[in-house]
Image: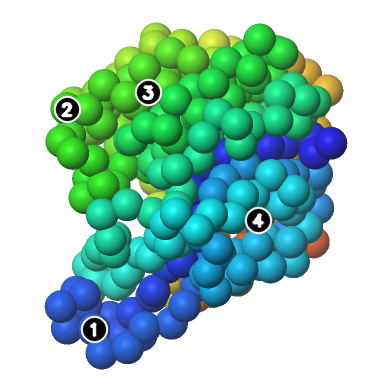
Amino acid sequence: MPEIVCLGEALIDMVAQSVGDLAHAVGFDKAPGGAPANVAAGVGVLGGSVGFIGKVGDDPWGACLEETLHGCNVDTSRLVRTKEEFTRLAFVALKEDGGHDFLFHGRRGADELLAPEDLAHDYITGASVFHFGSITTIHDPARLTTYEAVKFAREAGLTVSYDPNLRPALWPDLDLALDQMTLAMELVDFVKVSGEELEFLTGTKELEAGAKALYDLGPELVIVTLGAEGCFYHHSQATGVVPGFRVEVEDTVGCGDAFVASTLLLLNESESDLADLTGEELTRICRFANAAAAITATGSGAIPALPARGEVEELLEGRSAGADDPGF
C-alpha cells in the first residue's frame, strides 16, 4: 500500500506556446496535469511512496495520464477509466503580468464521475497521509466520494491535507466555493493556500490574520505560498516567513503542487507528530518545499518540471535563502 494517497482530478493542460491571453494564443502543447495528480507525481519523482485515486476518460488523454503517473512512480491501481465522459481539458496561457489565463473545456469531465464504489477503504486507511483538492467537491458524485474518502482517512488517524485550488470558472457560484472550502478546512490537518486564496477565504491579504483565521477553522498547519518571496506558515508552536530561492523563471504552473508534494513527503518522513513540530522543523520543511517550487519554475509545464530529490538537495546545499537570495 502507498504511504501517501492523493485523490482528485487528473486532466490534460493545453499550454499556450506564446505569452498573453488565450484569445491570442496561436498554438498549444499538451501537458498532463490536475493539481492532485501533480502532487502525486511530485511525491513519486521525489522518491516517496504514493498512489492516486481518480477517474479519467477511456480515451487517449486518459491513457496519457495513466502512463505519465506510472512513469513518475505513482501507483495507478485506483485510477478508473470510464466511457461515460471524456478526460477534462484545461487551456492555460501565461499572461504578461505573470498570472495565468485558464479555460476548462466542456461542461463536465470524467473526474466529476468519481463514485463511492471507486474507493477502496483499505487503500486509504493503509496510508499515513491523505491529500485532496477542491475541484472534486464541486459536483456529485465526486463531492460525495471525496468526503467519504476524507471520512475514511480521519477515522484511521491519517494526516489529512487539503489544497483549495481556487478555479472560479468551474464553480456554479463563488458562494458555493466558499462554503465547500470552509467545510473542508474543518476536516483537515494541513492546508496550503496562495495569497489569492487566502484573501478569498478570509477577506484579508494580511498574512498573520488570514492564516490565523484558517488555523482557527481546524488545520494544525497553514502555509501561504508567496511566489518569489517564499512562504508563510502558521502552527501552534511557531509562525514565520521562509524565503524562497532566486532562479530564472520559465513557467510557474505546478509550483504550488511541487510545494505541497514536498511538504507531504517531509511530513510523512518526520519522526514528530504534526502537532509537535518545532519552528526549526517547520522552517526546514518549508525551505525544502520552496526549493522544489523554485526548480519547478525553471521548467515548462507542471509534471515535466517536477524535481527529483537530489536536485532539491543540491539547491539547498549550494545556495542559502535569505537577504542575499530573496526569492525565485
Q: Residue at x 45, y 61 (%)?
A: 87
Measured in 3D between alpha carbons, the distance from the residue under mark 2 to the one under mark 3, in whole angstroms, is 20 Å
Q: Secondary structure at mark 3?
A: helix
Residue placed furthest toward the front: 83
Seen in the image, is 72 located left or right of residue 225? right
Asked where in the image residue 13 lies, by quadrant, the reply is: bottom left
State the SS at label 1: loop
Q: Secondary structure at mark 4?
A: helix
Crowding at dot 1, Cα within 10 Å, few <14 / some 14-19 / many 20+, comes out as some
Q: CA distance from mark 4 to mark 3?
A: 27 Å
Q: Position of residue 177 (x, y in %)?
A: 25, 31
Residue bearing the label numbered 1: 25
Q: Which residue is mark 4?
A: 41
- For the point 64% across and 49% down, the residue is 79
Q: Residues within 10 Å of mark 3 (few under 14, many from 20)?
A: many
| Numbered marks: total | 4
Lower sequence index among marks 1 and 4: 1
- What residue sits right under mark 3 in the picture? 211
Type of amino acid under label 3: Ala
> What x and y, as percent, mark residue 7?
57, 39
